[in-house]
Amino acid sequence: MTDLAKRDYYEVLGVGKDASADEIKKAYRKLAREYHPDVNKAADAEDKFKEMKEAYDVLSDDGKRDTYDRHGHVDPNQGFGGGGDFGGGGFGDIFDMFFGGGGGRRDPNAPQRGNDLQYTMTVEFKEAVFGKETEVTIPRTETCDTCVGSGAKPGTKPESCSVCRGTGQQEVVQNTPFGRMVNRRACTNCGGNGRIIKEKCGTCHGAGKVKRQRKLNVKIPAGVDEGAQIRLTGEGEGGLRGGPAGDLYIVIRVKAHDFFEREGDDIYCEVPLTFAQAALGDEIEIPTLSEKVKLKIPGGTQTGTYFRLKGKGVPRLRGYGQGDQHVKVTVVTPTKLTDEQRELLRQFSGGDSVSTQEEHHESIFDRMKKAFRGD
């Protein structure tokens, strides 16, 4: 069914319904940095982060976006498979509820796939750029080794329920003004399982599964970005009655960096220049993600000018090569001058007074020093 409580996905990301894929991606990245729980400590930051992540997952997928544009919010249990509010067999469920039929019955004793799990991992900025290998501990349910998932004591086996004859369902007949109706519900004797365990396994107590802490080695690929998911097949919860295990999805969150900012595979930073360097030109040293490089500043460079360092960005996650680093230069106005320097500047500027700025540019110097140290 449609969820009337949810906000419009376009409204969540702050884009129009005609927004391009690139505009949607940029809007998501901007909001992700703003509401990242590691940065934003507001009580509702994590909820907003999850809300925009859900919106981005739908609007960034052409198929899901098309379905959303036509039908709006769809019950997550039904998926985005088309068919509106009754997608995924919802109409059949309603038909069965009133008339007791219309489709095939699910065998309650058939093997059942285990649930998928999600684990959120926060990594440092440079760890996301260059990748890393780490170990995580995942709490999950696994198939009981003692009974091999049957739930019965070794040497015994479950018996078919005598009330529902193993179907797991009971049919209740009602006479109504509209005729005779059959309502199907879970069997009260076996709880819908279709079988009775008289002697339960001593390890899992009849559940067929046990809770364990499992350690896994996880490889974070170079170039991974905020919101990316790494899928580990078969590392979710154990299945029932011999069914396969679910999958584990590791969701990546990336900490912000003091000096570098990231847009896709490109890196952006801001470096200060003295008035003399900007006016006369100079060769300065620039910190990159992996090394220090020389950058030639031509004479007459204006504040706000960008220079590109080709191939000094982030390794491309699905391809060869790297993005670029874009360096924005900001001319720092001097704050402490000798009388002679002041007079020379007045002569140069035709007598105009020299304005000063300090705090912003001091912060630029501080961030740049950290970057040089590799922080």
Image (cartoon, rainbow, N blue to C red):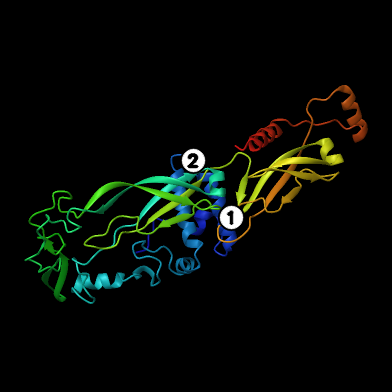
Few, some or many C-alpha atoms within 10 Å of disc 2 (few <14, some 14-19, many ≥20)? Answer: some
- In the image, taking residue 108 as reference, residue 271 lies left or right, namely right
Whether 186 is drawn above or below 303: the answer is below
Q: Position of residue 114 (x, y in %)?
A: 29, 59
* The residue positioned farthest toward the top in the image shown: 339
> Which label belongs to residue 26?
1
User: Is 132 in front, or is 3?
Assistant: 132
- In the image, taking residue 247 as reference, residue 200 lies left or right, namely left
The residue that appears at 21% across and 67% down in the rendered structure is 110
Mark 1 or mark 2: whose residue is earlier in sequence: 1
Quadrant, the C terminus: top right
Residue at disc 1, secondary structure: helix
Quadrant, the N terminus: bottom left
Query: What amino acid is labelled 1 in the image?
Result: Lys
Asked if the residues shown at circle 1 and circle 2 are in contact, with their CB atoms under 8 angstroms apart, the answer is: no
Q: Quadrant of residue 159?
A: bottom left
Query: What amino acid is labelled 2 in the image?
Result: Asp
Residue under label 2: 38
The residue that appears at 66% across and 47% down in the rendered structure is 268
Instruction: Confirm whether residue 19 shows in the render.
Output: no
